[in-house]
Structure formats: structure tokens, C-alpha cells
Image: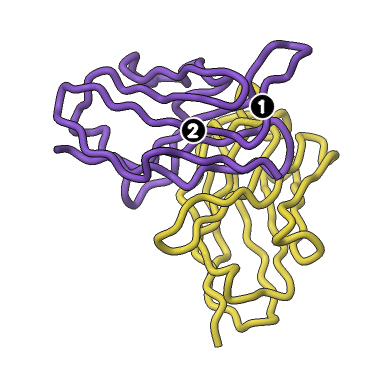
Amino acid sequence: EVQLVESGGGLVQPGGSLRISCTASGFTFSSYSMNWVRQAPGKGLEWVSYISSSSSPIYYADSVKGRFTISRDNAKNSLYLQMNSLRAEDTAVYFCARGGVTGRDLAQWGQGTLVTVSS
Amino acid sequence: DIVMTQSPDSLAVSLGERATINCKSSQSVLYSSNNKNYLAWYQQKPGQPPKLLIYWASTRGSGVPDRFSGSGSGTDFTLTISSLQAEDVAVYYCQQYYITPYTFGQGTKLEIK
């Protein structure tokens, strides 16, 4: 069974940093692209970042470019999102999602981890 | 960026009736070299992560009931639920993956009438 488990969320002050993680199981992690998608409280979905199976290419939404860094460790079946210079508008549940048949659709999702940016 | 616009924002349909949700992209998501539309549909129930329903605009995801179907091409797409079941109450999102950023529609909330 495919499982994606996010961790590392929490409360952080504006301007602060946080790294969230996603641990995968039940499939060959190194063969799939991965994404981060976020959802602000009561709002819709916003795609944040994409990383291919080999870590190149990498793409970001304009709203996080230069502040967030996606990475992966295929040996540890893990995906990461390093978030710096956090703003109140970054407050959201962050989902990791595995690429599907097309390589770009989001076929499997974790339950998400909540990141709250507030003083 | 490609803007995805869904209509309506909310919809109430009787059990057993048809539900139709529309999605329009600000530019074509049809890739001419393979004739595929880079468009997906997701279902999100309260308190749950989204679930992939449809990819390539019309291909059902694994385990998705056949009452869900997707259609359309280019810039105009439709998700149809042929006979609404109680468990279909959810918010539905379209998403283009033609070009980054992979943008979502604003969502359509589907309820029982």
C-alpha cells in the first residue's frame, strides 16, 4: 500500500524557517516525481513545487521561488521542503503528492502537515 | 500562468441525478505532439487529502467508479457524475499540468439537494 507521511509542521514566527518532510513507503520512491501542494485554511489548492525522480528538473510556484527549496533523498525514501523567510500567507496544510501515470498528475497524496506562520 | 476557472462555485444535486462541473483554462492545455490534454480532476472530502479522479482529461484513475467521467479538449472541460451518490459530496478541483506552475481551479462544492 502506498503511504506518504508528512511531518515537521508547526508554529513559526514571520521571517523564520522550517523544514518539512515526507516519508514514502509501499512503492519504489526513486522512480517517481514528487510535489508539494498547499491549502490555506478554508481555501483551495495551490501547487508549490515539483521535483523529478532524479532531482532534475525542479520547479517552483512564483509565490515561493527564492524562499523555498525542494529536495529528496532516494536512499531514505524521503522528500523535503526547506522554507525560509516565512510569511503569514504561507500558513497552510502542506501535502506531499506522488506523480502518477503522466508523471505530472498527482496520483497519491499524504494527509498533510500544518504550518502556521504567526507571531 | 494558465488560469483555471471552474463553474459553478457550488452545486446541489438530488441523489441519483447527474452532476456536471465545468473547467475552463486561459490557454489550451492540448499538447499537439501527442494529442493529449494535460488536465486532471481531483475530489476532496472534508478533512481528507485530495484524490485523483481523472487524468489526460478523460482517463479514470485507479479504482475510480465509472459514474465519474471527464470530457473536453483544448480549453473547455467537464467532469460528470452520472448518478450522484451520497459519498460524492466533496469539493472538486481541476488542474492543468501542461506547464508550470501547475495551476488548480478554485474548486466546486458539490452537495445533496
Q: Nearer the viewer, residue B6 or A52?
A: B6
**Residue at mark 1: chain:** B
**Residue at far bottom of view:** A119
Left or right: B35 in relation to A89: right
Residue appearing at x 49%, y 54% in the figure? A112
The residue pinned by badge 2 equals B23
Residue B57 on image: x %, y %: 54, 21
Residue A7 on image: x %, y %: 55, 59
Q: Which amino acid does the dot numbered 1 rest on?
A: Val
Left or right: A31 in relation to A12: right
As drawn, the label of residue B78 is none
Q: Secondary structure at mark 1?
A: loop
Left or right: A100 in relation to A16: left
**Quadrant for the C terminus of chain A in the image:** bottom right
Residue appearing at x 40%, y 61% in the figure? A42
The residue pinned by badge 1 equals B29
Q: Colour of chain A?
A: yellow
| Snapshot quadrant of residue B79 | top left
**Residue at far right of view:** A56
Q: Nearer the viewer, residue B53 or A20?
A: B53
Q: Is residue A99 above or below residue A82?
A: above
| CA distance separating discs 1 and 2 | 12 Å
Residue appearing at x 75%, y 47% in the figure? A72
Give neighbour class at mark 1: few <14, some 14-19, many 20+ (Cα, 10 Å): many
Q: How was this image coloured?
A: by chain
Q: Colour of chain B?
A: purple
